[in-house]
Amino acid sequence: SSGINAEYGQDHNMRQRMLKYTPEHMHCHATFYGPLAPPNTTFIATQGATDKKTSSFRIVATGVILGLDKTIDVVKKLKLTGTPYKIFKNTAFLKGMFSSILEVSKFEGAMIKTVSGIRGQVKRALSAPPGAFRASFEDKIQISDIVFLRCWVSVDIPKFYTPVINLLSPDKTWSGMRTVAELRREKGEAIPVKQDSLYKEIERRQKVFKPLVVSKSLQKNLPFKTKPKVEKKRKKQLYVTKRAVVSEPGERRLTTLMQQLLTAQKESDKKKYEKKNKEKEKYLSEQAKINAKRGEKAKERRKIFYQKNAKKDQAGED
């Protein structure tokens, strides 16, 4: 009796990568401790065969032994995240990624990357706070950047198995240890749920960038076309903007007349534009009819020409 401890798939670079779920309609590798058996030996995995209360069982997996190797290295992907708390030119102090100096020393020289795509490298551990370290980047990062580290961690295979030789005997005296699922089912306990493991929507605050500020000394050296030409907002309105304009009776009559003339001009231009479009459509339709007639006549001429040539060729052959 033995449990399948790790399921994994082999990458293109021969890395034994641990799988979270078994692939559907596909093969995968599994490693566990068990009795010595030659390669190409078939095996079967069941669930519920040792339960005295139930007489049925379920086949979990079937497979074949590929080889005996206790030095196999199964790894799983790990993504660590941290945040900078002090930034220099191309160097920054980061925290939150590791919990001790020993962990930092294991990852010295590892490649890190910000969400914005700036690459970096882990340099040295700092004395305080615990887990903080110094890192260098190819460009200056911001205090709001999130830095992450992609790495692979080895998965330990439990070195335990129990040989069962009397399971098929008439008197079943052996009973295996109950699983955690069976204990919870008997006690009526629910499966504990980790809040950190639940999928939830990520709410990101929209970042507001500061406006570009060009110093006065730099503005003096810039050419006129590149100088900022934004006027400052006035706290008080000028006399020209807030004064009231009162027209005299003669000016009002002139304004009304000009508005009427402009309206009449717009209406006249609109009618001319519509008339021009109608004439253009009529012209295009007539040209299409003429081109169709020309095509038919050209087709008839080609037909007569080919008939005459065919008769001449027949006469020459005779």
Image (spheres, rainbow, N blue to C red):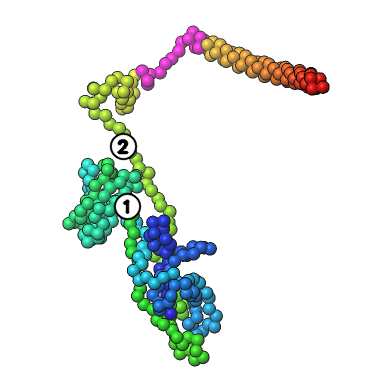
Answer above or below: position of 158 versus 115. below
Horizontal side of 225 relative to 297 (left or right) equals: left
* Residue 282, quarter of picture: top right
Residue 219: say if magenta.
Answer: no
The quarter of the picture where the N terminus appears is bottom left
Residue 248: say if magenta.
Answer: yes
Given residues 243 and 125, the one toward you in this image is 125
Q: What amino acid is at disc 1?
A: Phe
What residue did someone put label 1 on?
A: 148
What residue did someone put label 2 on?
A: 210
**Residue that sits furthest to the top in the current view:** 250
Given residues 237 and 172, the one toward you in this image is 172
> Does label 2 or label 1 sit earlier along the sequence?
1
Residue plotted at (50% across, 89% down): 169
Give the magenta-colored segment's residue range.
240-256
Whether residue 192 is visible = no
